[in-house]
Amino acid sequence: MSNIQVFFDANDGTHGTELWVTDGTAAGTSMVKDIDPGAGSSGPDYITPLGNGEVLFSAIDGTDGRELWVTNGTAAGTSMVEDIYPGPYSSYPSGITPLGNGEAVFQPDNDNGGRAQSSQLWVTNGTAAGTSVVTNFSPAGFLPTNLGNGFIAALGNGEAVFAGNDGTHGTELWVTNGTAVGTSMVKDIYLGAGSSAPQDITAIGNGEAMFQALTPAYGWELWVTNGTAAGTSMVKDINPGGANSLPQDITPLGNGEALFTANDGTGAWGLWVTNGTAAGTSMIPDVYPTGFEGDAITAIGNGEALFTATDGATGAELWETNGTAAGTSIVADIPGSSSFIDTGFVPNVTCFSAGTGIATPRGEVAVEALSVGDSVSLADGGAAEVAWIGYRQVDAARHPAPTKVWPVRITAGAFGTGWPHQDLLLSPDHAVFVEDVLIPVKYLINGSTVVQVPVETVTYYHIELHQHDLLLAEGLPVESYLDTGDRANFANGDGVIRLFPDLANRRPDVAWLWELNGYAPLILFGPELDAARARLTMIAANLSPQTADAARRCA
């Protein structure tokens, strides 16, 4: 084997989930360190090479909360970088992005009492002395919660571009070299106070990054940047005028080109290829005549990529492409795969764990006991008929990314007296109604009253009404299911069943569907999220120490 090391998290049944390292051999595979000693789990996350033989990650040691750690692959060389939020609390470092110079920028969700929430950008070289705040967007502005969810990308030249809001220009594209003087807005893409809201920011390997952004003249289109205003421009107006092409799944091929999916306004989604210029951007002729049905675009390092798609004749199968029509073909018609296939990415689903009490006019009923046609109570005092109930048992122990499916526990009273009236388990992307908006519960995890619970298996249910609305789950207002084409996540859904649901939305037109049919705005970052997190923190501080400690230990 080579001398390359791969770091991962694993649970050996004795030490809990800890950081491991392997060189691809049995002898070279071992636990790096029992960070949370004994059966406790440190839950390593955001494992990111620093580029100097060291690796950064977040972890919990059972004493200091979830903080930033560094390792060189040995127990002696593994330590907490800095206790950013001192004591038993967590700073929740995320979006760790190496700059290519032995440093990385990242975003804590809390520091020193949570004064900044997620509005600070930090830099680290893996030492306490080399870890500090780069810039603070608070109080006037903010950063998206978890920059790592498509809101930041390293350019490979010691800089990174990211989405930020300074309170004056809206959410725009910024650049940083890890210093305060080297951090600035790249370009006011949506002029004035409006937000271009850059997202799906993806490095394409030549000192540039691509992303989708919004302008009033062109809608959501594909953009390219080299970190300068002059080098930032729209690649092509794919869906002409103010309509949206909604480019997503940007996947670099490693040869200066990238694949992505988009809608050119002709009525069908397509698989597209681009070299960052308008002339070099075109749709690869449709795999499926009535619309591209592809998913899980994965580059394989030779200028080619694999993806799953259906051509209308063979069902969902594995395909390959080099970005040309001639180089795009089905790999194999695998018998039976059209009815059961892992597509890697799956749309967001709003799920209740089995046993959840749902309010109905006849009293609370366990979600699994409800039937289509039953009446359920709404948060506004009304009632509605159940249109459909989906269910799915998820084998989290075999899931390649279990944190994407582990349930989130909301402690009784976390949002106030009776909200919920007893502990509630939701899927990570299930949105709760707070601050007059809907917020996926995974963005409200605080390590005390809202925690993620590692499980081996979990059974999820979701309830669809005839229109998107608010149900009462254990007394807490939460959303009903909004159909965005993701029934394949469930055992009783139509068509393809996805093998490993990750509950993370990837369908390109979800934003449009939500705006059209959603009960309330869906918030992933911004002041409403900060207010909701502050509310949780305030209420958690007033809960009994026994209640708060029990909630944390459940995680």
Image (spheres, rainbow, N blue to C red):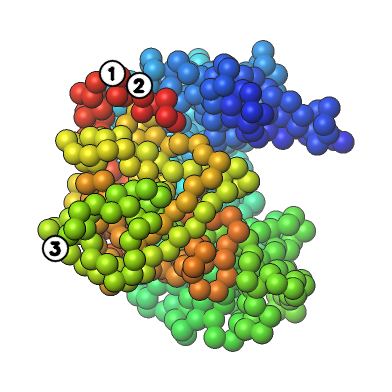
Q: Residue at position x 41%, y 50% from top?
A: 354
Which amino acid type is marked by label 1? Pro
How many angstroms separate mark 3 from mark 1 (CA)? 37 Å
Q: Which numbered dot is residue 382?
A: 3
The residue closer to the viewer here, 152 or 174, is: 152
Q: Residue at position x 51%, y 76% from top?
A: 269
Q: Quadrant of the N terminus?
A: top right
Q: Which residue is mark 1?
A: 545
- Label 2 near label 1: C-beta < 8 Å? yes
Mark 1 secondary-structure assignment? helix
The answer to which image quadrant residue 501 occupies is: bottom right
Mark 3 secondary-structure assignment? loop
Q: Position of residue 426 (x, y in %)?
A: 38, 47
Which amino acid type is marked by label 3? Gly
Q: Which residue is mark 2?
A: 549
Mark 2 secondary-structure assignment? helix
The residue closer to the viewer here, 312 or 354, is: 354
